[in-house]
Amino acid sequence: MAIAVSRDGHVATVTMDRPEALNAFDLEQLEALLAALRGLRDERDIRCAILTGAGAKAFAAGADIKRMAAMGPQEGEAFGRLGHAVADAIEALPQPVIAAVNGYAFGGGCELALACDIRLCSENAVFAQPEVTLGIPPGWGGTQRLPRLVGPGLAAELIFTGRRVGAEEALRIGLVNAVYPPGGLTDATRALAERIAANSPRAVRAAKSAMARAFAGEPKAGLATEIVLFASAFATEDQKAGMRAFVEKRKPEFTGA
Ligand code: CAA
């Protein structure tokens, strides 16, 4: 199953499970995640949700590059919109969502973690927005949510270089709240979720909804711009060169065309 949802008491855990691609997202997996999140929205008994990746290696390695490699602008736009819908659904869930980042969180994987309310990670977690190395800009909210979290200067460096951020740096720059040994992440996340779930669900939902107002207005216009720019990147030679090089396991050469 690509997306698994389990419930224990007042806590739901949503697991991205596509091991052959390090939990990278194709259309089907994105749609399944969207449906799972929308299902949780009306579950009054669920007071906190956890988003994590199956296996010990990856949270999610981003959007599926093998699928994207052949896309044109229209398909790119549809893929961008679907990724946005998933990130928005995380943000719009009335319950708090904790990302338990258990390995690689690259591209769209990092962007979905950014849409969660809280991020915890394991010592082997690695974050990156490597889209520009593939010939496209970030497309699932990273251009708007990363600067909000780590500040515009650092976000610019990370997005313009695509460089990787390990767990220790992620903690230092505020990308995650805490780091745990790989074997301890699940229990620590569960303990935090239960602590949240023990509080008034009505008050917690009210607080989440009020905090969401800080992201209303201009950033929404930014998200709309991001989709347009992400889609138009699929009309470029650089996107073909970058993604073909990934699929063929070699370094790309970008011409800017
Ligand atoms: N899409 C499709 N397949 C992927 C993938 C992705 N994003 N990430 C990993 N895979 C596949 C690999 O191709 C490989 O498949 P094969 O065995 O068939 O070759 C399998 O998963 C295992 O991956 P690796 O052998 O590469 O594992 P590794 O441990 O050597 O490296 C990694 C791990 C550093 C995460 C590396 O896989 C990698 O760099 N992946 C790409 C990550 C990436 O660039 N993500 C951003 C995508 S763009 C995006 O998300 C756009 C957006 O804004 C929405």
Image (cartoon, grey):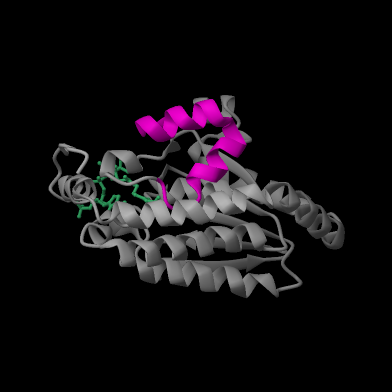
Residue 120 placement, left or right of 19: right
Task: Give the prevailing secondary structure in the magenta stretch.
Answer: helix
Number of labels in the image equals 0
Kindly identify the residue that appears in the image at 70 percent across and 75 percent down: 42
Q: In this view of the protein, which residue sits in the foreground, 122 or 83? A: 83
Query: Is residue 60 part of the magenta span, yes or no?
Result: no
Q: Position of residue 200 (x, y in %)?
A: 87, 58
In the rendered view, would you say 220 is above or below 143?
Answer: below
Whether 143 is among the magenta residues is yes
Residue 132's spot in the image, x, y percent? Answer: 32, 40
Is residue 23 something that shows in the picture?
A: no
Q: Is residue 102 left or right of residue 45?
A: left
Identified at 27% across, 59% down, the residue is 68
Could you tell me which residue is drawn at 44 percent across and 50 percent down?
Answer: 109
Q: Is residue 44 visible?
A: yes
Q: Is residue 192 left or right of residue 247?
A: right
Q: Which residue is more in the foreground, 229 or 13?
A: 229
Q: Nearer the viewer, residue 239 or 97?
A: 239
User: Quadrant of the image for the N terminus?
Assistant: bottom left
Task: Please tell me which residue lies in front, 243 or 135.
Answer: 135
User: Does 210 appear above or below 254?
Assistant: below
Give, as a single range, the part of the protein colored magenta. Answer: 138-166
Q: Residue 128, how many percent across, how many down?
A: 41, 38
Asked if 246 appears above or below 67 in the picture, the reply is above
Query: Quadrant where the C terminus lies?
Result: top left
Q: Quadrant of residue 14?
A: bottom right
Residue located at (60% from left, 37% from top): 149
Task: Answer with the quarter of the image where residue 162 lies.
Answer: top left
Q: Position of residue 80 (x, y in %)?
A: 42, 60
> To which quarter of the image does residue 92 belong?
bottom right
Q: Is residue 171 left or right of residue 202?
A: left
